[in-house]
Amino acid sequence: MLSTETARRFSPRALVIFLGVLMAALMLSVLSPSPAHADEVNTDKYEYSLGGNVQFGGEPVEGVLITVTGGGYEAEVKTDADGKWRVGVPEKATYKVVLDEDSLPKGVIVKEEGGNETTAEFGLTKTKSVNFFLGEGERVTVSFFDQFINRFANGLNFGLLLALAAIGLSLIYGTTGLSNFAHAEMITFGALMTLTFSVTFALPIWLAIIIAVILSAALGWGLDAGIWKPLRRRGVGVIPLMIVSIGLSLALRYLYQFFYGGQTEQLPGSGLADLHWGAISLSLIDLGSMAISIVVLLAISFFLLRTRIGKATRAVADNPSLASASGIDVDRVIRIVWVLGAALAGLSGVLWAYFRPGVSWDMGFQILLLVFAAVVLGGLGTAFGALLGSIIVGLFVELSTLWLPSDLKYVGALIVLIVVLLFRPQGILGRKERIG
């Protein structure tokens, strides 16, 4: 036992002082600088990783922003005091690694033009190293106007391919009242069929795309004949039909994953170099995608405005009962709309696979929300409204990265949708409807 004199020494005041000194020591140990180690992002989440060094004159450069993108995945990391960085990635795919030159110290540049970007492909191991070597010089930054023009061109390209999917979805909604969540898998189907016939069967890419679009149209015909028409004849309501479409979407999506796996694969021609026209940088694939989209959209416009079936489609979308009383075969029109909508979705999937780039089992689901946003923004059930809404969404998604982090660009498009609907609930080209 402690003596009385010893116990006095451990008075409450002394105990408080002792505990304060102990806590201060612990805080100093926590806050004191520890040995530098590579900044790591998602390395504990994924088994594959990309990493490397950033050096200037043999010395490490700290705080340099590195962006890794590919297969629908994107991550950012900054170098540590040793100039090291590491990013975990979900699969062995091809990734683009970009060094942000704006994050370099003053007077430091990348030695070679375009050397701030590189493509990384995995070998037999689960890691891949990507190093950047810098030099002295004056960095030439791209003006805001040049960035705006280039991203405007990319946004227009994205909006046009989005319009192909949105018009099909809008036509289906206009004629049946169904919000088809399985439209995402119809987009994916076109890309998967193109991958199958171009890579697995080694057919020319143009022939593979034609076959994929034809098979997509056949898928639309089969879905309507096997599921939607029988349900319509039974008088199933719109809400149960929508729930069926959600279940069908899940079933098809995981069926794709079962047969094609979870990896991302590239279509032939995905790695073509960009062509430059002043501030605009587009590849031949981008130019071809825009040209195909414009030609198909013009053909759809002619179909809806000038042909008998197109006029009947608009009549059914306006008032199915009145169209039926006028002698129009409503079921036939709906069947044609399903075939046309599926074909457009399949073609959109092919172009989306080149824009991402890559084909994966859930690629259609990744843009489904944007497709719905374009349809609602333009006006439910109106094909030309879907076109206008798609262009707005595509442009905003790309241009918003001038101010917003790239991770938030899709969120920004949905904010625009909400703002527009607050002032015009029926959409830009939609009609006001009386409720009740």
Image (cartoon, grey):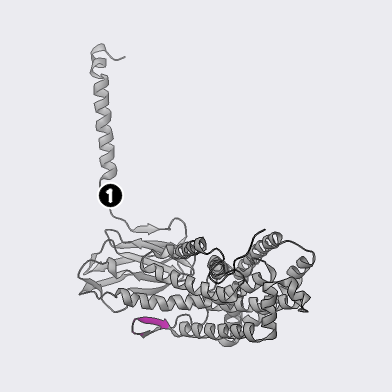
Q: How many marks?
A: 1
Element under disc 1? loop
State the image quarter where residue 220 is shown: bottom right
Quadrant in the rendering for residue 436: bottom right
Placement of 36 over or under 340, stated as above or below: above
Taking the spot 73% from the left edge, 74% from the top edge, the residue there is 222
Q: Is residue 1 left or right of residue 44?
A: left
Our reading of the magenta stretch's main secondary structure is strand
**Mark 1 belongs to which amino acid?**
Ser
| Front in this rendered view, residue 194 or 329 | 329
Quick check: can you spot residue 126? no
Please provide percent x and percent y for residue 128: 40, 68
In the orientation shown, which residue stands out farthest toward the right? 234
Q: Nearer the viewer, residue 4 or 235?
A: 235
Indicate yes or no whether the magenta region holds residue 278.
yes
Locate the N terminus by quadrant. top left
Place of residue 301 in the rendered image (x, y in percent of width and height, measured from the top left):
59, 83
Q: Residue furthest top?
A: 4
Q: Residues within 10 Å of mark 1 (few under 14, many from 20)?
A: few
Picture coordinates of residue 87, whole percent (x, y): 40, 62
The quadrant holding residue 398 is bottom left
Region of the chain picked out in magenta, as a range: 277-282
Q: Which residue is mark 1?
A: 34
x and y percentages locating residue 262 in the rendered image: 56, 66
The answer to which of 254 and 305 lies nearer the viewer is 305
Magenta stretch encompasses residue 76: no
Residue at left offset 28%, top offset 38%? 26
